Amino acid sequence: MSTTQRPRTGTRGRIIDVALELFSEQGYQETSLREIADRLGVTKAALYYHFKTKDDIVHGIIEQAAAPIDEVIAWGEEQEWSPEVRDELIRRFAAGSAERAPLLRFFHENQPALRDSSAGLEFKERMIAMIKLVHGPEATPAARLRAAMALFSFHTALFLLKQDLAAGPEALCATGTVTTLDQATEVALEVALEIAARIDSPRD
């Protein structure tokens, strides 16, 4: 499994990348559209062509980062729950976790500003949909909790094993034998599958 972040091309993609950097570095509320345009080396008019407001940019960030999750959800909704499907959902979710690392840092650093934002709520809804697919129908409270813990193990790994999420996917992790984000994701996948293995079968 490769978790190397794919480079984004085009003006819209560059705007999203630069805005995400600035939002993470100095905060969503403290970053202006002018600063985003200046770092890009474009005029505000060129920026407005793609995004009218900072909220529009955040929606763009969410849509781009959540596209792989939407694909996993669409696949999962077509399957009948089974332990094999449960584990495949987790593996597919893990495949995009490295690319979501900058997004997670962005959310973490800007929680007050984004807590009730429509973009933040949309991402939360996606995660809830993923959790439901992992635990299956008629799940017990324990199964629902284990499903959530399995998925969020990837988020936890990124925060615990990475010194600086903005440094890039090949930056050194904190300590031990895990030295790249790829390796951190593999460790998180192992833990996630161990947790998921204890999810009760639906209707048992």
Image (spheres, helix red, strand yellow):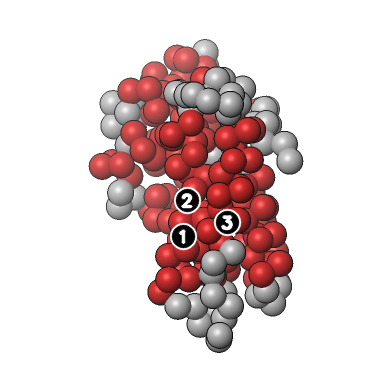
- What residue does disc 1 label? 148
Whichever of callouts 3 and 2 sits on the residue coming sooner in the sequence is: 2
Q: Check disc 2 and give the amino acid type.
A: Phe
Residue 43 in sight: no
The residue that appears at 64% across and 65% down in the rendered structure is: 86
Left or right of 106 on screen, residue 16: right
**1 to 41, vertically: above or below:** below
Amino acid type, mark 3: Glu
| Mark 2 secondary-structure assignment | helix
Using the image, determine if residue 100 lies above or below residue 76: above
Q: Does label 1 or label 3 sit earlier along the sequence? A: 1
Which element carries disc 3, helix, strand or loop?
A: helix
* Residue receiving disc 3: 194
Q: CA distance from mark 1 to mark 2?
A: 6 Å
How far across and how far down the image is residue 37, in percent? 46, 20
In this rendering, would 90 be left or right of 159?
right
Kindly identify the residue that appears in the image at 57 percent across and 68 percent down. Answer: 133
Q: Are marks 3 and 2 in contact (CB under 8 Å)?
A: no
Secondary element under disc 1, as helix, strand or loop, is: helix
| Eye-nearest disc, 3 or 2 | 3
90, 20: nearer the viewer: 90
Q: Nearer the viewer, residue 115 or 164?
A: 164
Q: Residues within 10 Å of mark 1 (few under 14, many from 20)?
A: many
Q: Quadrant of the N terminus?
A: top right
The structure residue drawn at horizontal position 59% and vertical position 64%, both measured from the top left corner, is 197
| Quarter occupied by residue 185 | top right
Instruction: Check disc 1 and give the amino acid type.
Output: Ala
Mark 1 vs mark 3, foreground winner is 3
Calculate the distance from the C-alpha at mark 3 to the C-alpha at mark 2. Answer: 13 Å
Q: Are marks 1 and 2 in contact (CB under 8 Å)?
A: yes
